[in-house]
Image (tube, rainbow, N blue to C red):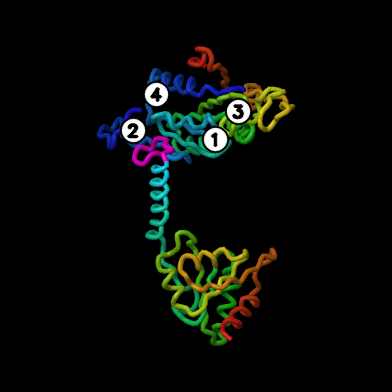
Amino acid sequence: MAATPSLPALGEARHAGLIHRIGGIEKQVDTGHIDYDPANHQAMTDLRKGKIDGVADHIPEQEVTLGAEGGKLVIVGWGSTFGPIHQAVRRARARGRDVSHVHIRHIWPMPRNLGPLLKSYDKIIVPEMNTGQLKTVLRDQFLVDAKPLNKVSGQPFRIAEIEAAIESALS
Amino acid sequence: MPRLRDYAILKAVQRTMPELGVRPENTVFVSGIGCSSRFPYYMETYGFHTIHGRAPAVATGVKLANPELDVWIITGDGDALSIGGNHTMHLLRRNLDCQILLFNNEIYGLTKGQYSPTSRVGTRSPSTPFGSVDRPASPCSFALGSGARFIARGSTSTRSCRTC
């Protein structure tokens, strides 16, 4: 195959240097031609991982959804559990409990400051409508003692269920 | 066992495109999955190796985004008539301004030779060890029935491949 010119100067062929192919088969670093070489596969895998990790530079830092940075307890949620978590934390705070709500929007890669933020709390509870996937990732990534609160009954969390978990953790 | 002579088709296209004066940067080959669909990697044009049976959907998007592009869909008998049979039918009836090259080798070659929608009755394969019982689909009849405007058929074992 002919080598692709790097940056064509002529207007007539201004798109020629941009010719490329998209596809799932492993390609050679630099040229983009099909390449099954084991070392090349390793290099391309590392390259792709680096690109995904780099996404963290372009997403906002994690903010505390309700409450304070640092404290006795944080409830960490993601997705559709926002409502019951938020209301449970709001009610508990109204009763004077030291609890905050952190709701993660960017699941992977995670915000750069998420680790230090979680470590600023004494206890972490992760309510999830699965058997504890985010909890496992948080424990793996940040070595924090995140505790699960799981429910897979086909029905959403009740505010009272999360309130009960907050009271239990703070008593 | 039926075999796909990909190289004959590749060579025919690689020879014919320059003869037609086609500009590589104005040409896109969009493929699905299968031995046929590795084709874009071997052309010095824009290429998109997409998802099984869904090349027509991606090609439609490409054409919508830039109608000036010369869009070619590369597919096979399994990709176009089984996994993507629905997409193929709608692409044909909509008469998208593109070309479809369907490589029909009457078998799923890439996955070790299971019988396909165009396999003949009695084809022995890993998935039909006692011979297939289904009557084969006819790609040209399918295209006619779906309202295709131009249909042609060629064989890789003859020189007609260059003019098909």
Q: Eyeballing the image, is A142 above or below A10? A: below
A111 relative position to A160: left or right: left
Disc 2/disc 1 C-alpha distance (Å): 26 Å
- Which label's residue is closer to the chain start, 1 or 4? 4
Identify which amino acid the numbered label 4 is placed on: Val
Tell me what residue is drawn at x 48 percent, y 41 percent: A24
Pointer 3 or 4: first along the chain: 4
Give residue B33's mark: 1
Number of dots carrying numbers: 4
- The secondary structure making up most of the magenta span is loop
Give yes or no for residue A36 being in the magenta stretch.
yes
Sequence-wise, which precedes: disc 1 or disc 3? 1
Q: Mark 2 points at which residue?
A: A16
Which label number is shown at residue B77? 3
Q: Residue furthest left?
A: A9
Mark 4, secondary structure of its residue: loop
